[in-house]
């Protein structure tokens, strides 16, 4: 009687582990496919960004139009003001 009970428990354990193993494998395949798709999209995004950057580098900008010091200081002031407002909340 004891051996029959142990055999039944062993069969249930094997069925449970097979079920978990099969579904784990299926989930890993789906995760892997999603990662491949994400990497593909990221690669396309990088290519388009690089292409846009090359197109913008070919255009010549007048150096008198933009004063880098003013842009930098205004950007820094904006960031500091934003951080102060966020800390106050």
Image: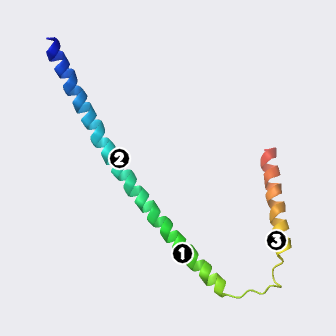
Give the SS element for disc 3. Answer: helix
Q: Which residue is mark 3?
A: 71
Residue visible at 61% across and 78% down? Answer: 53
Left or right side of 39 for 29: left
Q: Is residue 88 above or below residue 58?
A: above
Q: Furthest residue to the top?
A: 1
Left or right side of 41 for 57: right
Badge 3, how many Cα within 10 Å: few under 14, some, many 20+?
A: few
Q: Which residue is mark 1?
A: 48
Q: Quadrant of residue 50?
A: bottom right
Percent coordinates x, y for residue 35 in the rendering: 43, 57
- How many angstroms separate mark 1 from mark 3 (CA)? 27 Å
Q: Furthest residue to the front?
A: 3
Left or right side of 65 for 51: left
Q: Quadrant of residue 68?
A: bottom right
Cβ atoms at labels 3 and 2 below 8 Å apart: no
Badge 1, how many Cα within 10 Å: few under 14, some, many 20+?
A: few
Q: Earlier in the sequence, mark 1 or mark 3?
A: 1
- How many angstroms separate mark 2 from mark 1 (CA)? 32 Å
Percent coordinates x, y for residue 21 in the rendering: 29, 39
Residue visible at 57% across and 74% down? Answer: 49
Q: Earlier in the sequence, mark 2 or mark 1?
A: 2
Q: Is residue 89 above or below residue 62?
A: above
Cβ atoms at labels 1 and 3 below 8 Å apart: no
Q: Which residue is mark 2?
A: 27
**Which image quarter is the N terminus in?**
top left
């Amino acid at each position: 009687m004891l051996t029959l009970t142990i055999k039944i428990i062993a069969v249930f354990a094997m069925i449970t582990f097979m079920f978990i193993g099969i579904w784990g494998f299926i989930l890993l395949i789906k995760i892997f496919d999603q990662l491949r798709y994400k990497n593909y999209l990221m690669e396309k995004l990088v290519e388009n960004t690089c292409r846009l950057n090359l197109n913008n580098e070919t255009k010549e900008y007048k150096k008198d139009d933009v004063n880098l010091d003013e842009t930098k200081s205004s950007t820094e002031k904006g960031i500091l003001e934003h951080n102060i407002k966020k800390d106050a909340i």
